[in-house]
Image (cartoon, rainbow, N blue to C red):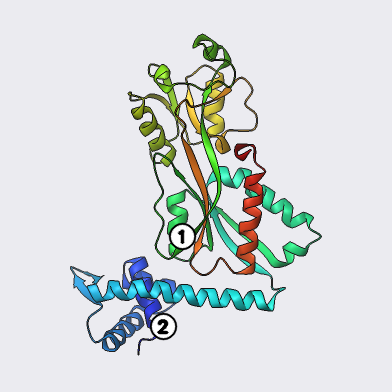
Amino acid sequence: MLDVRRLRILHHLATYGTVAAAAEALHLTAPAVSQQLAVLEREAGMPVVEKHGRTLRLTTAGELLVAHAEVVLGDLAAAESDLAALRGGRRGQVRVAAFASAARTLLPAVYRALAEEDGEWSRLLTLDLTVLEPDQALDALRKREVDMAVVHGYTVLPRDFPSGSEQDVLMQDPVVALLRPDHAAHLGLAPGEAVDLADLADESWLTPGPDTSCYEMIQRTCGASGFVPEVRVRSSDFAVLTSLVAAGAGVALAPLLAVPDDTCGVGLHPLAVPVSRTVFAVSRSGTARRPDIHLLCSLLARAAAGHPAAL
């Protein structure tokens, strides 16, 4: 009979890639992990790992067991969540990773809600927040370093999610063009009028760094309009980009959540061919019913529904 604890060890090996890393995550020694894998192979009746150079990789049987382990571990997490809900009144600490603009706009509303409800919700939930880009946040979720990841995926750049996870859609966040009002008027655009990106093909562009998904979104969106943007400024601080647009340095694209509250000297224009990003709350399978995680997801959804980007 297969042992759940050994399935968990195999799952960690698949997640972390090496015996040493899996052992560190499980607070075990590397020899102990190797010993448990050997026992698991005897239980399975066939090898679950094989040597590949100086490392181990999963066999076909190992990959099959990892897929089943995700289901089993998800069911165990769901059972723990149901018991926590039944007990009730237990304070939970949720580790959440969120991308910067969500941390700036959505998470403050969650903290305010926790502080304003006569302490009732704060007795159930405390937050440990880390700001991470979506790829990093999902990797932390996969490695069980966080309990929830708030991430996004663009219509032109869909997001891949790790197996064994559940996603709740929080909101749609439209991408807008940032233009100086006099520049927009020169292009014949009224305030707030949709812009055809092809009309901006010869402009200087201000973008986030090339290591961000927003940069790739801009490349793909401009490419669909028939040009490659001439990037003159790179900064992942959207406040910097907005200020430089106001100063006449060029034009920019940004998701509405990322645009600073103070846009003095900058007009926001929707795109004639809309592009948006979907904001997700992602948790491991089975954990969404935990009272603290369920409450956090509900508060995030309420914050998202109240944001101007969603109205």
> Number of numbered discs present?
2
| Mark 2 neighbour density, 10 Å: few (under 14) some (14–19) many (20 or more) | some
**Residue visible at 35% across and 80% down?**
33
User: Which one is nearer the viewer's eye here, 272 or 128?
Assistant: 272
Looking at the image, can residue 119 be seen? yes
Image coords of residue 267 (percent x, y):
58, 22
| Mark 1 neighbour density, 10 Å: few (under 14) some (14–19) many (20 or more) | some
Q: Is residue 170 above or below residue 237?
A: below
In the picture of the structure, the residue carrying the numbered disc 2 is: 4
Numbered badge on residue 140: 1
Looking at the picture, which amino acid does disc 2 mark? Val
Q: State which quarter of the image contains the N terminus.
A: bottom left
Q: Earlier in the sequence, mark 2 or mark 1?
A: 2
Q: Is residue 274 above or below residue 3?
A: above
Apparent side of residue 227 relative to residue 113 in the rendered image (left or right): left
Apparent side of residue 12 relative to residue 94 in the rendered image (left or right): left
Image coords of residue 302 (percent x, y):
66, 50
Image coords of residue 69 (percent x, y):
38, 75
Looking at the picture, which amino acid does disc 1 mark? Ala
SS type, badge 1: helix
**Residue visible at 64% across and 32% down?**
261
Q: Is residue 147 above or below residue 158?
A: below
User: Which one is nearer the viewer's eye here, 248 or 224?
Assistant: 224
Image coords of residue 113 (percent x, y):
73, 53
Q: State which quarter of the image contains the C terminus.
A: top right
